[in-house]
Image: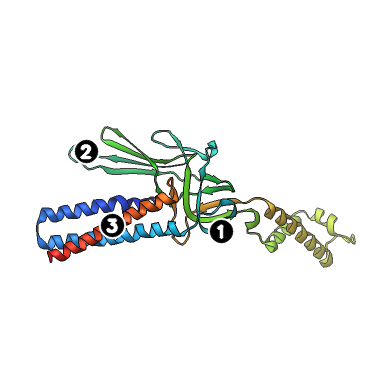
Amino acid sequence: MQLLNGLRSQYVGALTSASYLGLLAIALHSGQKSVWIISLGLVAVIGLFAWVSTHGRARAIAEMPTSRIGSAAQGYVELYGRASVDPDNLITSPFSGVSCIWYRCRTYSRDNSDREWREVSCNVSEATFEIRDPTGACRVDPDHAEVMGPEVRTSYSGAYKQVEEMLFGGGLIYVLGEFSTVGGAHSALSLSEDVSALLSDWKKDPERLKQRFDLDGNGEVDLREWELARRLATRTVEKQHREIRQESGVHVIRASKNGRLFLISSLSPQKLRQRYLMWSFLHLAVLAAASVAALGVL
């Protein structure tokens, strides 16, 4: 699933272009009117799908203001910060051994009788990394992300081709996704559950329980004394909860549960939007040209 999500943007930018050329090649090779109509119709349908996809991404980026990490609202946000170069934040790409914050490594092969490269394996990193802006830090969970603008390195070894895509620490990283804060003021705490757990823990040591709460010395904790124990447990848990909520929480941005666009890029929001707009205009032009051509063939 992660691989499919990560390839969406590449599908729009590369696979659609190959589809256009392949369908036109089929029509040219056939020379039949019916094949031309079908091929041009499919080109128009693909162009429509690609235009909707790229234009929607451009709009999503344009309409979402960049949030500061330290004051970002819980929910769907856009962040733009510098990736940490701390060794704990870096991983190693399996092909080149280069330190980075994210990689996708593909291996392709072909035999002597075939000129086409076929993908035989794909490895995508899942480690989280950190980005910072002047207001704070946020962990980025890249699982299920579309990644735009990585550095691409290609190498060949016999009948194999290795394609390596990487994002690096120290660079500015754009992220559009679901932001949440774990711990601190946003901690999910239950007073009743924690009080019950504390009382259960006290019950495990009956002698200690009697020493603390058997006020009349009759050898057992009666209902009145147990109520005093409950009140003390409540005050203890409330104090613990206050201390937890005063601690600094950990900010995390990840894929949205409702399937909204989750995007990570080394490009700025402006450049990223311009790239999607360029692709959307191209697909719109292909859609219009294919529609006009199909009508002309009829």
Amino acid under disc 3: His
**1 vs 2, front mark:** 1
* Callout 3: SS: helix
Q: Across the whole image, how many numbered discs are drawn on residues?
A: 3
| Residue 142, image x, y percentages | 46, 49
| Residue 148, image x, y percentages | 39, 48
Disc on the earlier residue, 1 or 2 = 1
Horizontally, is 126 left or right of 241 in the view? left
**1 vs 3, front mark:** 3
CA–CA distance between discs 1 and 3?
Answer: 35 Å
The residue tagged 2 is 111
CA–CA distance between discs 1 and 2?
Answer: 52 Å
Please give the name of the residue rendered at 54% of the width and 51% of the height, measured from the top-left corner. 252
Disc on the earlier residue, 1 or 3 = 1
Please give the name of the residue rendered at 35% of the width and 55% of the height, measured from the top-left corner. 277
Q: Nearer the viewer, residue 66 or 219?
A: 66
The residue tagged 3 is 283
Horizontally, is 229 left or right of 70 in the view? right
For residue 39, the mark is: none
Label 2, residues with CA under 10 Å away: few <14, some 14-19, many ≥20: few
CA–CA distance between discs 3 and 2?
Answer: 34 Å
Disc on the earlier residue, 3 or 2 = 2
The residue tagged 1 is 74
Label 3, residues with CA under 10 Å away: few <14, some 14-19, many ≥20: many
Amino acid under disc 1: Gln
Is residue 1 something that shows in the picture? Answer: no
